[in-house]
Amino acid sequence: MGHRLANHLENHPEMGRAVCGFLDDRKLPGKGVMGRTSDLAQLARTGFVDEVILAAPHDRDLTLRVLHAAQELRLDVKMALDLFGCEPTRETERIGGIPLISLHEEQLPVAGLWLKRVLDLAGAGGAFIVMAPALLLLAILIRLDSPGPVFYTALRAGRKGRPFRCYKFRTMVRNADALKEGLREQNQRQGPFFKISDDPRITRVGRILRRYSLDELPQLLNVLKGEMSLVGPRPHPLDDFSAYAIQHLPRLDVTPGITGLWQVTARRNPSFQAGMTLDIEYIRRWSLGMDFKILLKTAGAVLRGSGD
């Protein structure tokens, strides 16, 4: 039954589901079997799984164990029923003629997330129009200060770990990435983060841009493209993302942001785990009101020139 479900979903991508694989305690990994049911937590996190479908289970204890594990992981859980050719008396979801019943569904704030996207588009679009002369001036200053491009683009880990090209005003010398490995021993951050004070790669104009967070302004384009939001966990470079532990992956369940809770509460805290804790707290407590408060605090921090 599991293969019937998978085949139907693979042949109907318009249904919006992609099959990651099977968990089976009776078969060795291979031919679509990713592991045992005890591997659910690790595989669900690393594969950014949203839903588990139990394919006609007959083991009560196993079913309850998977259900409880999925609830802890905040996954939707559905069960495929073998009705032996009979028709259910109540309407259920069907995949390839197989009826499914829902055992657990995560309640998403659909209306709130839609409004968040509308506000992102309005805010980013309005800021681009209002700040166009200032953006042009900053671009000219960057070119006059040091040789190299105006913009710095690099791959970042986005929602569900999908890489995207993040835009910034260039604040460092042209070969900054090549010089990074030679400075690793001076890293003042704990965990995968890399940051040092008085970074020799930063240009004169770059220091001013960083102090007032002006180097982040081109990310308004990422917001318009839907790759980022005005508020959310900051997107990490791919080399930092590759060093994530499994408990860090939930921060990628949402769209990254230009500013976030960590930036306005503990920006100078060197602890990687402290930043992760604040990002997870933001995701679990999210509301539009929280976003507005973070934006107001961000504006105050920018005016004070507290960036580094």
Image (tube, rainbow, N blue to C red):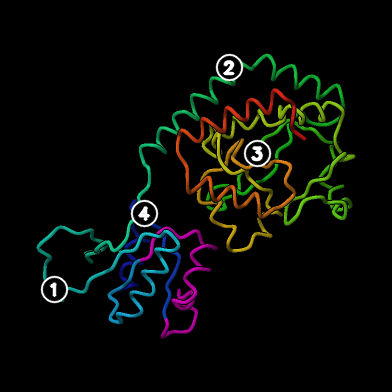
Find residue 103 and report its horizontal and vertical position in percent: 29, 64
Measured in 3D between alpha carbons, the distance from the residue under mark 1 to the one under mark 2, in whole angstroms, is: 62 Å
- Which numbered disc, 2 or 4, marks the residue that appears first in the sequence? 4
Q: Is residue 215 found inside the magenta-colored segment of the image?
A: no
Q: Which residue is mark 1?
A: 85
Q: Residue at left 31%, top 70%?
A: 4
Residue range (magenta): 25-52
For label 2, the crowd category at 10 Å Cα-Cα, with few meaning under 14, some 14 to 19 and many 20 or more, is: few
Q: How much space separates mark 2 and mark 3, taking CA atoms?
A: 25 Å
Q: Is residue 186 left or right of residue 275?
A: right
Q: From what the image shows, is residue 283 above or below residue 143? A: below
Are the residues flagged by discs 1 and 3 in contact, CB closer than 8 Å? no
Q: Which residue is mark 4?
A: 106
Quick one: label 1 or label 2, which is nearer the N terminus?
Answer: 1
**Pointer 3 residue:** 263
Q: Are marks 1 and 2 in contact (CB under 8 Å)?
A: no
- Work out whether 11 lies above or below 131: below
The label on residue 163 is none
Q: The N terminus is located in which quarter? A: bottom left
Residue at mark 4 to residue at mark 1: CA–CA distance: 31 Å
In front here: 178 or 220?
220
Q: Which label sits in the foreground, 1 or 3? A: 3
The amino acid sitting under disc 2 is Ile
Q: Which disc is residue 129 wearing?
A: 2
* Label 1 or label 3, whichever comes before in sequence order: 1
149 or 42, nearer to the observer = 42
Q: Is residue 37 magenta?
A: yes
User: Looking at the picture, does residue 104 appear above or below residue 267?
Assistant: below
SS class of the residue under badge 2?
A: helix
